[in-house]
Every structure is written in structure tokens, then in C-alpha cells.
Image (spheres, rainbow, N blue to C red):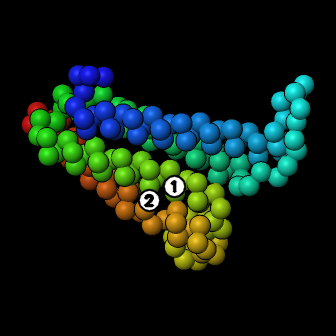
Amino acid sequence: MNGLSPEARRLAGNGALVIAAGLIAGFCLGFVAIGGFILDPLPSARFDFPGSEKGWRAMHIGSLLNGVMALAVAGIIDRAVASAKAKAWIANGLIFAIWANTVFYLFANFAANRGLSPWDNAAGPGNLAGLIAFTPAAFGAFLTLILMLMFAKKAFSGR
């Protein structure tokens, strides 16, 4: 990794941490699906794990994919983007976005409105979890789109 720029290393490290969060969510998915911590023949504990199977699955898959996106960009940003300023914008923006999405998946799991707005919507009533889920993710979604278009332009132009 010594050949990577500081931006690429930072992006790769955060991508790996978001993947770890997604892997932990996979355990939570299993706990919800089977009704507790059950590893026969080891000692088991049956309990109602918070959240839903659908919510933990979303966090598991979504965080894994966000982490992979960060690792993919980290792997080629130094070759595709010449400008240090553009690299910093892309890397820092994506780091914010992947963590905003991870927060979204976590808190949306506890929001009756699925975190799709900070207020009541067709999915259900708003609450604090919905507000926490929605606010950074809404900004992160638009930011990711802008950064990916910026990255594409830099990659196609070679600048």
C-alpha cells in the first residue's frame, strides 16, 4: 500500500471498516432470523434481537457494497485522477457518503418510516431514528452521484 496516495489509503481503510460493519450486520441478521444466539451444540441464548430481518439484510448487503465501492475507487484513483484537489474531494466525499449510508442502514432498521424521510410518510410515522437515518444519507446520496460523475469525467479525460 506504500504506492497509494494518502487519499487512496484513507478511502481504502474506511472502505474496509464499512465492510466490517456490514459483516457485523450479517451476524445481527442471523440473530434475528433464528431468534437469538444459537450455535448447536454450544450454549445458546434465545432472545428477541432488535431490528428486522429485512433491515439487517439491507445493512449487511448495503454496507458490503459501499465498502467495495470505496475499495474500487481507492484502487484506481491515483491512476484515474491527476489533480490532488480532485482526489481529496472524491476521497473525502466518498468517505462521508459510505459512513452516512452505514448510519442510514442502522437507524432505518429502527424507524417505522424506514428512514426515508424525517417525518411521517407512506411507510410509517417519523421518529428520531428516521431523522438520524435520513439526514446524512440524503446528503450522501446526492454527493455520491456528483462525485461519481466527477470521477468518471476525470477518468475519461485522463486529467
Q: Which mark, by number, is residue 103?
A: 1
With respect to residue 139, does 28 lie above or below? above
Q: Nearer the viewer, residue 2 or 77?
A: 2
Please state if 133 lies on the left or on the right of 76 as rendered.
right
Q: Which mark, by number, is residue 5?
A: none
Secondary element type, mark 1:
helix
Please state if 16 lies on the left or on the right of 12 as rendered.
right
Q: Say which amino acid is labelled 1.
A: Val
Secondary element type, mark 2:
helix
C-alpha separation, residue under disc 1 versus residue under disc 2: 8 Å
Please state if 2 lies on the left or on the right of 108 as rendered.
left
Residue at 62% across, 39% down: 24
Tell me, yes or no, if residue 69 can be seen here. Answer: no
With respect to residue 2, does 115 lie above or below? below
Residue at 61% across, 74% down: 127
Choose top left, top right, bottom left or bottom right for residue 51.
Answer: bottom right
Instruction: Return the x and y of residue 68 as percentages of the image width and height.
Output: 43, 34
Q: Along the polypeptide, which appears first: circle 1 or circle 2?
A: 1
Specify the quadrant that holds the N terminus: top left
Q: Are marks 1 and 2 in contact (CB under 8 Å)?
A: yes
Q: Which mark, by number, is residue 137?
A: 2
Residue at 16% across, 36% down: 81
Instruction: Return the x and y of residue 89 as percentages of the image width and height.
Output: 22, 49
Q: Are there few (<14), some (14-19), or many (20+) residues within 10 Å of tag 1?
A: many
Q: Say which amino acid is labelled 2.
A: Ala
With respect to residue 97, does 63 lie above or below? above
Residue at 82% across, 43% down: 36
